């Protein structure tokens, strides 16, 4: 692995984690000034690591769901550094089902190192909560638009990340786990995270090239330096995505979403040469 590609990938990781990078609440205030937050999963409690509620965009009602990391020490602790518990994912699913009932498109903003791996989260079923969201988001009959704002970490990101259109900010990352975790597994040395980052194909450019995401949103000098450039790009992406998706019939939307995710990771050599997906093992 050459130093240029290694340094470039690791630089993106560091920018995605930059302490001054705007968080989801800041983005929501800019794009959806009439946002009304709703709380609770109706089962256990409210999880501050996931924010959700109602808003309008372009004159139409939408539901917004987002990971929130917090902006100072006290707030980061309160938000658990953007790492949701099971009740966060169950709150998100409650709001998604509400959105479907009232035919509101869903905008999901991803920014998390991953779901919280603590004992309490395990006891309350974090894996089941994420798995349930994956299944139910595939079944939603309303448009779902996903924005990866900073870190898109593992199942914690996927728990609100199944969408019809997915875009990443230029310096965001999206991966199966952190580079440190990857390095600890591959090299038995977390200090080799920069080398691992280059192998993981976690940057927006990488994932766009692989067809995992639909658009890369430019940031100018970086969201922490020039947030307005990124906000304008995000606004444009949302307007285009929602305009396109709103004209698609629900049954067609579901088929297209299924096909989108079914095709991820399929190389030309691995694609079946005949028959339908249903007849292939």
Image: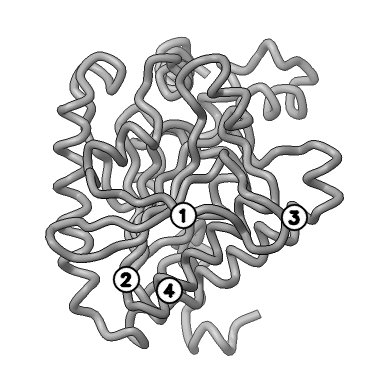
Which-is-in-front pick, marks 2 and 1?
Answer: 1
For the rendered model, the colour scheme is one colour
The answer to whether 42 appears left or right of 146 in the picture is: right
Q: For marks 4 and 2, give the CA distance.
A: 22 Å
Of labels 4 and 1, earlier in sequence is: 1
The mark found on residue 127 in the picture is: 3
Q: Which residue is mark 1?
A: 38
Q: Which residue is mark 2?
A: 104
Residue shown at the point (45%, 46%) measured from the top left: 66
Which residue is pictured at 17% across the width and 39% down the height? 233
N-terminal-most mark, 3 or 2: 2
Q: CA distance from mark 3 to mark 2?
A: 27 Å
What is the x, y in percent for residue 248?
24, 80
Work out whether mark 2 precedes mark 1 in sequence or the reverse, and give the earlier one: 1
* Corner quadrant of residue 82: top right
- Quick one: SS at disc 2? loop
133 or 43: nearer the viewer: 43
Q: Nearer the viewer, mark 4 or mark 1?
A: 1
Q: Circle 4 sits on which residue?
A: 259
Q: Quadrant of residue 48?
A: top right
Q: State the residue at coordinates (17%, 27%).
A: 228
Q: Under tag 3, what secondary structure?
A: helix
Vertical placement of residue 76 versus 115, above or below: above
Mark 4–mark 1 distance (CA, rounded to whole Å): 32 Å
- Pick whichever of labels 1 and 3 is earlier in the sequence: 1
């Amino acid at each position: 692995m050459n130093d240029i590609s290694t340094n470039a990938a690791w630089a993106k990781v560091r920018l995605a984690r930059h302490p001054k990078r705007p968080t989801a609440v800041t983005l929501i205030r800019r794009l959806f000034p009439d946002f009304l937050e709703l709380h609770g999963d109706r089962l256990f409690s409210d999880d501050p690591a996931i924010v959700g509620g109602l808003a309008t965009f372009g004159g139409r009602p939408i539901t917004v769901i987002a990971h929130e990391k917090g902006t100072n020490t006290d707030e980061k602790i309160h938000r658990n550094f953007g790492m949701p518990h099971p009740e966060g994912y169950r709150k998100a699913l409650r709001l998604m089902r509400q959105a479907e009932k009232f035919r509101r498109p869903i905008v999901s903003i991803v920014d998390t190192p991953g779901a919280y791996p603590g004992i309490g989260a395990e006891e309350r079923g974090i894996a089941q909560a994420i798995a349930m969201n994956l299944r139910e988001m595939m079944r939603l009959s309303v448009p779902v638009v996903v924005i990866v704002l900073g870190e898109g970490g593992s199942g914690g990101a996927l728990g609100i990340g199944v969408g019809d259109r997915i875009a990443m900010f230029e310096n965001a990352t999206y991966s199966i786990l952190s580079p440190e975790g990857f390095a600890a597994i591959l090299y038995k040395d977390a200090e080799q995270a920069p080398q691992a980052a280059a192998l993981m194909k976690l940057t927006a450019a990488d994932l766009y090239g692989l067809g995992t995401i639909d658009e890369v949103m430019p940031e100018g000098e970086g969201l922490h330096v020039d947030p307005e450039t990124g906000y304008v790009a995000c606004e444009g992406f949302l307007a285009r995505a929602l305009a396109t998706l709103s004209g698609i019939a629900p049954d067609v939307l579901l088929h297209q979403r299924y096909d989108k995710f079914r095709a991820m990771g399929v190389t030309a050599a691995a694609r079946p040469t005949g028959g339908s997906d249903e007849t292939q093992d």
